[in-house]
Amino acid sequence: MASRDLAESLLPGGGGDSAAAASSDSHDEYEERAYDSDDKVSISISDSDAEADGGGAPSRPPFSWRKLWRFTGPGFLMCIAFLDPGNLEGDLQAGAASGYQLLWLLLWATVMGALIQLLSARLGVATGKHLAELCREEYPPWATRALWAMTELALVGADIQEVIGSAIAIKILSGGTVPLWGGVVITALDCFIFLFLENYGVRKLEAFFAVLIATMALSFAVMFGETKPSGKELLIGLVVPRLSSKTIKQAVGIVGCIIMPHNVFLHSALVQSRKIDTNKKSRVQEAVYYYNIESILALIVSFFINICVTTVFAKGFYGTEQAGNIGLENAGQYLQEKYGTAFFPILYIWAIGLLASGQSSTITGTYAGQFVMGGFLNLRLKKWLRAMITRSFAIIPTMIVALFFDTEDPTMDVLNEALNVLQSIQIPFALIPLITLVSKEQVMGSFVVGPITKVITWIVTVFLMLINGYLIVSFYITDIRGAVLRSSLCVVLVVYLAFIIYLIVRNTSMYSRLCSSTPKRS
């Protein structure tokens, strides 16, 4: 009885005099949901949104700027994953090592990312559930737990880089007074900012992230103005595809950084923050329409910021001796030595942008972790407890990294590469379930994707898996030493590939025939 009371006290609204009310609640009320009904933003939809009579196609109301504003928010939280410190490091290294040559790839990587994120939002709106919840319903328990473990690993890898990036920014802004581990502790406290803002409503939280994105945009736009990259070279780089053997590593880094596994889960949950009647097709159709517009606008902003970072370092360091040594920590110092500024030191402009990137991405990582854990495991806990658990997953390993590694040590580069590989190999475990679910009429109803969209998405997924395969092979050849370790990784790789094949073929007729032909135990 005591354990039950403790469990109820950890539930939202649990404890106190709620026992009698709880006994009458339906089972559905104890299933994890991304947002409680009271937390959702109300969308004022007029009577003209009603379904068309006679079973005809519903007519979507005319475009409204006011409604677009009400829907604006989830896409901008989603786009932060395109702007985390890992992306910024990939941008600056691509610019320094290859100049303007890979801007076209950055453009198309963003387009691929947009396609994936729009499908994630479509899934969330059409079903009223997010990807982690649907995976729990779609797959057997062992596969659900495996998917959860893979997603958590990707989250930890991303969080380590994001927290370290934020800590580096704090170290720069403090003039080296605050050590790396101190910056990690300060960054860990953003969990409380998140909880504080979340208690005041979704719109307040979204406004906070809008300020951080605006800070990034302003900081990197000022850097762009200070360094004055070539507009002609920028346009050529966007339009003309160029790729050489010397820039393959940077090209793979650009593509790998754009698609973040946890972000696919996050976006499908964020769109639950608006009150949408999923039983009315016209309202779902309108929500998908506005979310598409809002997400594309957000990704245009993220693309602008990534372009600024890449071109600044292309202008300043392409072809120089420093090109191969630039990282997050020394990038600002190199900019300061090369450009300086009479108005405000460019070193601190860089650090402010990096801090905004690190803080925003770590908070959204906490947000994504809550949805992932709650959705896969059906854990319905109070917000503060979920946030603390999720934050601990990232802060503990990050603190270990901060205490035992120097950001200028070559070992840190190997660790960063390992973390990039860790995140990249998790991508199939987000994309394959997403494509599977949006292609099922039983799940999506009339909002199931068409064959053309399905084919294009599978092409993108296979391309990303090939990119990840290159990363894995490259890391295995250059950084893995010892017969025992290599043999162990080979075994892990076989299991990894077998799980991917299972996810792909599970919903095929071949798999159904195989299952039906297998005798069942009595």
Image (cartoon, rainbow, N blue to C red):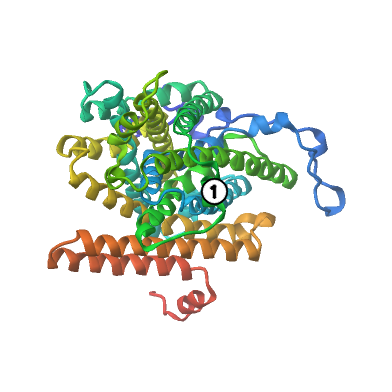
Relative to 138, is 120 above or below?
above
Apparent side of residue 250 relative to residue 214 in the rendered image (left or right): left
Give the camera-side residue of 361 and 85: 85
- Please state the horizontal and vertical placement of residue 28, each as a whole percent of the image: 53, 42
Q: Residue furthest top?
A: 343
Marks counted in the figure total 1
Quadrant in which the N terminus is drawn = top left
Q: Which residue is rendered at x = 40% and y = 62% of the image?
A: 244
What's under tag 1, amino acid-wise?
Gln
Give the camera-side residue of 311 and 414: 311
Residue picked out by circle 1 = 117
Circle 1 Cα neighbour tier, 10 Å, few/some/many (<14 / 14–19 / ≥20): many
Q: Which residue is rendered at x = 36% and y = 69% of the image?
A: 498
Give the camera-side residue of 143 and 476: 476
Residue 52 in view in this figure:
yes
- Please state the horizontal and vertical placement of residue 84, each as a whole percent of the image: 41, 39
Q: Which residue is rendered at x = 22% and y = 44% of the image?
A: 412
Dividing the picture into quadrants, the one containing residue 453 is bottom right
- Please state the horizontal and vertical placement of residue 191, each as a whole percent of the image: 36, 27
Quadrant in which the C terminus is drawn = bottom left
Residue 113 in view in this figure:
no
Give the camera-side residue of 212 and 362: 212
Apparent side of residue 120 relative to residue 337 in the rendered image (left or right): right
